[in-house]
Amino acid sequence: MSAGPDADKGVARLRSLHRRRPGEGALVLPGPWDAASAQIFADAGFEALATPSHGVSASLGNADGETPADEMFAAVARIVRAVEVPVTADIERGYGLPPKQIVERLRECGAVGCNLEDSQEGALVDPRLQADFLAEVVAAAGGEIFLNARVDSYVHSAADPLADALVRGRLYVEAGAECVYPIGAPPGDIGVLARELKVPVNALSPAGGPTPGELGAAGAARVTFGGGLAQRAMAAVKEMAEELRHGG
């Protein structure tokens, strides 16, 4: 599939998809791990895609968090080239790159959005330091990158994850984040975060639920899947391998 017009893949298009009208439900963004999976999702009619670092890393033979920056950006570039819809990229915490270089690398690979998380080596980063970092990314992007600020309060042992996520979310929105991603937040907290932060909230739909529909009803404007879809695909390949191995 050849790349479509820039407008179809641009940041303005991605922003517009986050402005959901009543009754539309959440924007569902599948997570492709390579160009082939990206084409399948786009051909199925999904309006944008969100690469997962976990799934991409697995496709490259790496554990999550262990893919070098060059390999991750190259993989994202292959996905962008394969489809005619906007692609936003999970780039973990930016691989230690300075904000201007993060933006340059995103532009080079064609991604029009990114996730940046606020934990490192299993520990939450000071929220004010993270907000300063995000503000520098926003300034460097000049409106050309849709920033989704991941909030790790629910996965890294905050004593009161909702309260912590609200503190972090407010700081990140003030820094210029256009969407907040409290990964692992339950549906009840998603609604609180959406009301209080007043920006689109990204919710994770893990295997076994909550479903995208349930998360949208709870207040999520955007639903992603982390590496879950890649894991499901690999489980299917494993089952196929077992059938072949045993003469099925």
Image: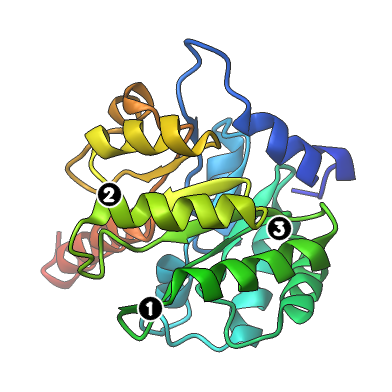
Q: Which residue is mark 2?
A: 162
Residue 228, x across and y down, in percent: 32, 56
Q: Is residue 240 left or right of residue 108?
A: left
The mark that comes first in sequence, 3 or 1, is 1
Please give the name of the residue rendered at 49% of the width and 85% of the height, measured from the top-left corner.
Answer: 67
Q: Is residue 182 left or right of residue 112?
A: left
- Disc 2 crowd, CA 10 A, few/some/many (<14, 14-19, 20+): some
Residue 236, x across and y down, in percent: 26, 56
Alpha-carbon span between mark 3 and mark 1:
21 Å
Residue 152, x across and y down, in percent: 35, 63
The mark that comes first in sequence, 1 or 2, is 1
Residue 137: give its label.
none
**Callout 2 secondary element:** helix
Alpha-carbon span between mark 3 and mark 2:
34 Å
Nearer to me, 216 or 64: 216
Instruction: Find the residue positioned furthest to the left.
Output: 246
Q: Is label 3 or label 2 in front? A: 2
Residue 93, x across and y down, in percent: 52, 76
Q: Which residue is mark 1?
A: 64
Q: Is label 1 or label 2 in front? A: 2
Instruction: Residue type at mark 1: give it.
Output: Asp
Q: Which residue is mark 3?
A: 80
Please give the name of the residue rendered at 80% of the width and 64% of the height, measured from the top-left corner.
Answer: 139
Query: Is the C terminus in the top left, top right, bottom left or bottom right quadrant?
Result: bottom left
The mark that comes first in sequence, 3 or 2, is 3
Nearer to me, 123 or 90: 123
Please give the name of the residue rendered at 82% of the width and 52% of the height, measured from the top-left corner.
Answer: 143
Instruction: Residue type at mark 2: give it.
Output: Leu
**Callout 1 secondary element:** loop
**Callout 3 secondary element:** helix
